[in-house]
Every structure is written in structure tokens, then in C-alpha cells.
Image: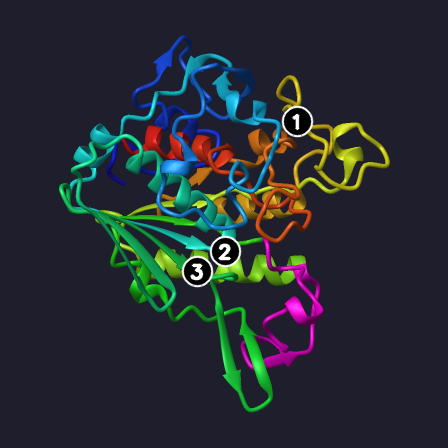
């Protein structure tokens, strides 16, 4: 797959492949098994000096008073996660195009990557930004590296037809745009249970069958299988390196972290101790891992779910432009920076 990733690896085996640049103490280093430790050197950048961060994510700007959430570093159990080196990353990626594809959680990670790079480069660096249709691209001109985000809530298509808006679980028409990149990082989950005014479709179609609704987890799995088939049929993995982001967790049910009766993340200021989350692995993540296991082409799981579950403190809560309770997205600087450290370890 390029970028130092062993071909044919997936899930558990990939942990060996994702340690490029890490210090290993064992024959096998699992970068996703570990705990959060306080580190006074964090955060990795000053959010006020980044290009404009979306109003949902800029927690310091919108008044978050406790800043300890910025000071936690992910520490794998048997090795160290390599530090982020922007110039090394851009040199390694010279001339390449990187694209994040998915919902606002993909935007969250994309903005983190842009901030990590922007904050580490000299002020004379030439950085441009351009938005065309569903794609926003930041280009680091001195290296010819572009970092894009393509907004796609479901990965599969929504088509306006005579009967209304149809979510087509077996159709992907944006693939030609996506595959014209060297690194792809996919994500979908956040919108699959949206209903009412927040639901952007009226019907679901599978093959010739059109229905008003169906079990949303079944629909999610069907869309992922369509995406998996697209990967196997359309992606040249000699050219393109693929990742699928694990399910990004939310924190609205305190019983998941041993606080019965708590209904949001508002008062959470520190991560959970240790490496085990009482609420267990989300069903959606198990579906993701099952679908990935059936893909013939090499696709790496960016396994963020379990380590992110421990970060009940890392959401904006009400410290965003809208003052609404948000325990779904993540503050920047913050947790998505670690997601990008894991991506960095895989690519560099």
C-alpha cells in the first residue's frame, strides 16, 4: 500500500505495520492499546493561531474554562507513539493528495491535520485554501501536498427523484473524485440514526426495492458493503493508500462511564483511567470491523473508537458558537490530534 504499510494487513495484524517511527519494546506493538497520561508539553499547537476552526470545535475561543483536557497524551502500553514532525510528514508526502471523506467528524480530523501542519511550519510558508462543491482543500505549496475534506454523510448516494430524496444503499457516484488521491481516510456513522427534520432523505433504495425506512444498523452495514465493493473493484492500491476511521463515540449516557443518571459530557474534565471503557464497544464499530475483514484490497482500520471512548472530557459540550450541548464532536486542539498522530505513524 505504500507509506511503509505492509500489504494484506488488517485489524489486529496491522498493529505491527503501524509502528513506523515508534519505539518498540516487544515483538508486537499495538498503538491502540494504552491509556491517557498528563503531559505538560501538550497541546501540540495553539488553536488561536490555526486557520479558522469550525464554530463547533473551537472550545477555547468559546469560553471553555477548564483546559486540562488539552494536556493529555495517548501512551501505548508497550511502545511510544512517534511525535508529529510536520516537515518530515510533508517531505514524505511531497506531491501527494490526501483526502478525508465523511461527515463532520471527518471535518474535525481534517481541521486537526491542517492545524498540526500549519502550526509547525515557518511563517513564510505558502498555504492556500480552496472550496469547490463538497470539497475543501488546503495546499502546502512548498511541498505540493494537498489535504482535502469531502463532505459525504453516508458515503453512498442521495438522489433527488420524483418521489423525493432517495438514499441509495447500493450506489456510489463520487468514487471517481475520491480515487484521484494518494491517501484516502473514510468515515461514516453520525447521520445513520438522524430522523425528522435532520434526516436528509425520504426513502431508502436497495436494488429495485424502495422503502420508507428500515433498520438503520442494517442500512449502515449495507452502505459499508457497497463501499467495500467499490474499493475492491475501483481502487488501485498500488497508487492509493486507504484507511477507514473507526466509529467516533459520543458521551450522552453516563452509565457508560460509571456515572448513572448523567445525560451529557458537560461536567467531564478528565479522561477515564486505564484502558477499559465500561460501556463496551459500539455495535456500529463491530459492523465496521466485520465489513473491513471481508475486503480483498488492503485497507487499514484507523482504530480510534476505544481510545476515544475514554475521552469523555474532550467534547465541546456547550463551549461552541451555538451554546448547544455537543458530546459528539471534539475540541481542537484535542483528541483528533491523536487520531492524526496514529495516521502519521502509518504514513511516515
Q: CA distance from mark 3 to mark 2?
A: 6 Å
Which residue does the numbered mark 1 point to in the structure image? 269
**Quadrant in which residue 17 is drawn:** top left
> What percent of the width, then of the height, locates residue 239?
22, 49
- Between 15 and 334, the one lying in front of the other is 334
Q: CA distance from mark 3 to mark 1?
A: 30 Å
**Quadrant in which residue 219 is drawn:** bottom right
Pointer 2 or 1: first along the chain: 2
**Quadrant in which residue 81 is drawn:** top left
Pointer 3 or 2: first along the chain: 2
Specify few, some or many for label 2: CA neighbours under 10 Å numbering under 14, 14-19, or 20 or more.
Answer: many
Q: Is residue 19 visible?
A: yes
Which residue does the numbered mark 3 point to in the structure image? 151
Residue 195 within the magenta-colored segment of the rendering? yes
> What percent of the width, then of the height, locates residue 182?
25, 49
Per the rendering, the mark at residue 64 is none
Per the rendering, the mark at residue 103 is 2
Q: CA distance from mark 2 to mark 1?
A: 26 Å
Tell me, yes or no, whether the two marked residues, 3 and 2, touch with CB atoms within 8 Å. Answer: yes
Q: Which span of residues is magenta-colored?
A: 190-216
Q: Residue at x 50, y 53 (%)?
A: 104
Here the colouring is rainbow
Element type at mark 3: strand
Amino acid at each position: 500500500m505504500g507509506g511503509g504499510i505492509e500489504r494484506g494487513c488488517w485489524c489486529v495484524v496491522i498493529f505491527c505495520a503501524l509502528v513506523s517511527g515508534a519505539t518498540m519494546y516487544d515483538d508486537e506493538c499495538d498503538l491502540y492499546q494504552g491509556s491517557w497520561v498528563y503531559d505538560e508539553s501538550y497541546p501540540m499547537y495553539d488553536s488561536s493561531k490555526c486557520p479558522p476552526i469550525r464554530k463547533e470545535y473551537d472550545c477555547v475561543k468559546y469560553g471553555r474554562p477548564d483546559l486540562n483536557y488539552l494536556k493529555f497524551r495517548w501512551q501505548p502500553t508497550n511502545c511510544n507513539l512517534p511525535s508529529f514532525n510536520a516537515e518530515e510528514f510533508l517531505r514524505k508526502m511531497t506531491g501527494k493528495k490526501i483526502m478525508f471523506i465523511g461527515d463532520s467528524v471527518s471535518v474535525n480530523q481534517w481541521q486537526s491535520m491542517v492545524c498540526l501542519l500549519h502550526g509547525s511550519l515557518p511563517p513564510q510558508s505558502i498555504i492556500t485554501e480552496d472550496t469547490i462543491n463538497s470539497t475543501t482543500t488546503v495546499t502546502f505549496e512548498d511541498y505540493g501536498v494537498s489535504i482535502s475534506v469531502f463532505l459525504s454523510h453516508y458515503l453512498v448516494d442521495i438522489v433527488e427523484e420524483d418521489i423525493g430524496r432517495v438514499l441509495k444503499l447500493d450506489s456510489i457516484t463520487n468514487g471517481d473524485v475520491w480515487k484521484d488521491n494518494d491517501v484516502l481516510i473514510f468515515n461514516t456513522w453520525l447521520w445513520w440514526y438522524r430522523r425528522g427534520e435532520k434526516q436528509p432523505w425520504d426513502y431508502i433504495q436497495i436494488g429495485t426495492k424502495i422503502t420508507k425506512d428500515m433498520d438503520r444498523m442494517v442500512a449502515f452495514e449495507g452502505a459499508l458493503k457497497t463501499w467495500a465493493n467499490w474499493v475492491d473493484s475501483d481502487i488501485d492500491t498500488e497508487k492509493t493508500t486507504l484507511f477507514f476511521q473507526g466509529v467516533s463515540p459520543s458521551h450522552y449516557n453516563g452509565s457508560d462511564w460509571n456515572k448513572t443518571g448523567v445525560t451529557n459530557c458537560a461536567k467531564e474534565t478528565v479522561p477515564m483511567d486505564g484502558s477499559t471503557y465500561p460501556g463496551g464497544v459500539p455495535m456500529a464499530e463491530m459492523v465496521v470491523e466485520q465489513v473491513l475483514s471481508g475486503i480483498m484490497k488492503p485497507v487499514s482500520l484507523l482504530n480510534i473508537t476505544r481510545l476515544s471512548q475514554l475521552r469523555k472530557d474532550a467534547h465541546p459540550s456547550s463551549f461552541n458558537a451555538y451554546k448547544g450541548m455537543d458530546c459528539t464532536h471534539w475540541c481542537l486542539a484535542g483528541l483528533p490530534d491523536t487520531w492524526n498522530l496514529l495516521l502519521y505513524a502509518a504514513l511516515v
